[in-house]
Structures are given as structure tokens and as C-alpha cells.
Image (spheres, rainbow, N blue to C red):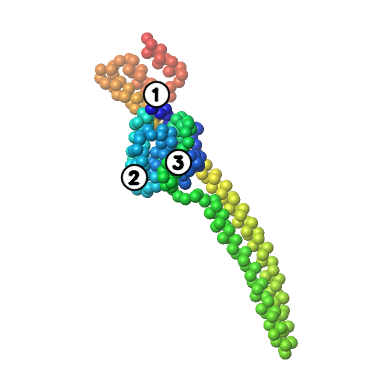
Amino acid sequence: MAAINVYHTSVTTDNLSRNDILQWINTALDANYIKIEDLCTGAAYCQFMEMMFPGAIGTRSKRVKWNTKLEHEFINNFKVLQEYFKALSVEKIVPVEKLVKGKFQDNFEFVQWFKKFFDANYTDAHDYDPVAARDGQPLGSGGKALGPGAGGSSSGARVVPAARPAPPKVVPQPIARPTTTTKPIQQQQPKITPVAHRVPVSAPAPAPVHHATTAIGNDHHQNARLQQEIDNLQDLIQQHAGQIAGLEKERDFYYQKLRDVEMICQEPDYESSPAVQKVLEILYATEVSKRYFNQMLLAFSR
């Protein structure tokens, strides 16, 4: 049995975002991953391999540590993954030392490759129960991702100040006092007048609280939208960073080739050759026009 090899570089435009990757993993494996960094355990990759190639490494697949936070057990899981790769002739090199550190960029690049590998090899030809396959053990970085819901509960807590209309309870107390005293009628009048002043002050209080509640709800939705935009921009930055890294590698590769050519041209045996001098002129030229470049090619052809 051999798998279909996938050759992937970071200089691509069809990569999925971190949210899409996490949704795919959590749906396929019935897992609860919240961050890309938590894929550093290697357990998800091992279960995907068993899903695609059941029995490829026999009982050795039972060595996977599903719910672990220990680095040496991360390494154990990646060793199991490497056994899958070896048995299936997968040529991809697994950067174990980088992945187990839990850095976002390293794990994001590897899972991008693995998603393409999965799409190329998975046939969905058999029923697979991921939870039963790992004996019911949880897989992922946490429980149910409540994320926005948690924010909703906190905003509900902020509405508690709406209970401020309670002050009207104080109003009946001064009003009740004149009824208990029947003798000094003239003393009741000055007590009633301050109560009349208090009622208009406390009555309008609920209105601003209602507006504050509405404003808090609007702020919550706006914050959620802005957070989504931030996540999308961060994904875009990560993709651009990967593209830049790939271009820099290509630049260094070709620069080293030119440097090797320069070293050969500077050797005493070749330094006096007219052709070598032409090569050096091209190497040291700050700007090479099309006409000048054609002249150089013509000179070499003679």
C-alpha cells in the first residue's frame, strides 16, 4: 500500500484560514480544538492516518496518546505518524522538533500540507467512528468552544444595573409616615413635599438604563464583527509571511549560484578569458538593458 504524495510550498493562494482548518478537524474527528498551536500533540494526524489507511501499521496505532500535555508524549505521537509515513512511502519530512514547541507558524504550515494530503488520499469508502476509535477519549484543547456565547453572558451581566429602579421602594416609606401620625397635621405637609420632588427624579431612571442595555448589545455585536476581521487579517498576514519566506529562499538559492559562478570566473586559469570577462560584466552591471544583454549573448555565441 502506498499513499499519494503531495508536494506543497507556502507560496500558494488556496490555503485555508485557521478557522476553516479547525472546523474541518473538529467535524471530521468529533474533536474540540480551539487553536492551531494545540495540534502540536500530533494525535489528530495519527487519527486521520488511521481513518485514511486503517490497519496500515497494525497495533502500533494504539500507542497514540490522545489527551496529553507532555512534550515527550507529543514526540511519541509524531513517531507513530512517521511510522505511517514510512509504511505508506510518504516522502514528507515531519519537523518534529519544531511542531512539538507549539508555535503557530510551524503548525499552521504543516496542517496546510496535511489537509492537501488528506484531500488527495481520503476516499470515504468505509464507516469510521472517531470517538469509538480512541475509546471515547477527548481530543482537542478544551471543552465546547463557547467563545461568542461566553461574551453574550458577560454582556448580560452588564445589564444588571437595570435593577436601579429599586429606589422607588424608598418613596413609600416617607409617604407612610403621615398616615401613622394623626395629631400634628401641619407637620405632615413638609414631609409630603420632598416626596413629591423625589418621585419625578426617580421615575425617568429606567429609560436611560434601557438605552444603555441596547448600546451594550450593539457594542457586543460590533466587537464580534471586528474580532472576525482581525482574525481574517492575521490569517492573511501569516500567508504573506509564508510567501515572503519562500521567495527569500529562492532568492538566496539563485544568489549562491551567481556567487559560485563569480568565484570560478576569478580563478587565475579563467580570469584572462574574454568570455569570462563578459560574464563578470554581466554580474557586476547594476542595470542591464535588453540591447546590452543581447550583445552579451551574441558575444558568447561566437
Q: Nearer the viewer, mark 2 or mark 1?
A: 2
Q: Secondary structure at mark 1?
A: loop
Q: Is residue 11 visible?
A: no
| Residue shown at the point (41%, 39%) measured from the top left | 47
The residue beneath circle 3 is: 130
Q: Quadrant of residue 82?
A: top left
- Residue 258 point in image, percent of width and height: 35, 24
> Is residue 283 found left or right of 207 in the rendered image?
left
Q: Is residue 184 above or below residue 173?
A: below
Q: Is residue 111 visible?
A: yes
| Residue shown at the point (72%, 79%) measured from the top left | 193
Q: Quadrant of residue 131?
A: top left
Specify which label sits upstream in the sequence, 1 or 3. 3
Q: CA distance from mark 2 to mark 1?
A: 56 Å
The amino acid on which the numbered mark 2 sits, given as a three-letter code, is Glu
Q: CA distance from mark 1 to mark 3?
A: 62 Å
- Residue 224 point in image, percent of width and height: 56, 49
Most foreground residue, 94 or 195: 94
Q: Is residue 277 above or below residue 150?
A: above
Specify which label sits upstream in the sequence, 2 or 1. 2
Circle number at residue 73: 2
> Is residue 4 found left or right of 233 in the rendered image?
left
Specify which label sits upstream in the sequence, 2 or 3. 2
Circle number at residue 285: 1
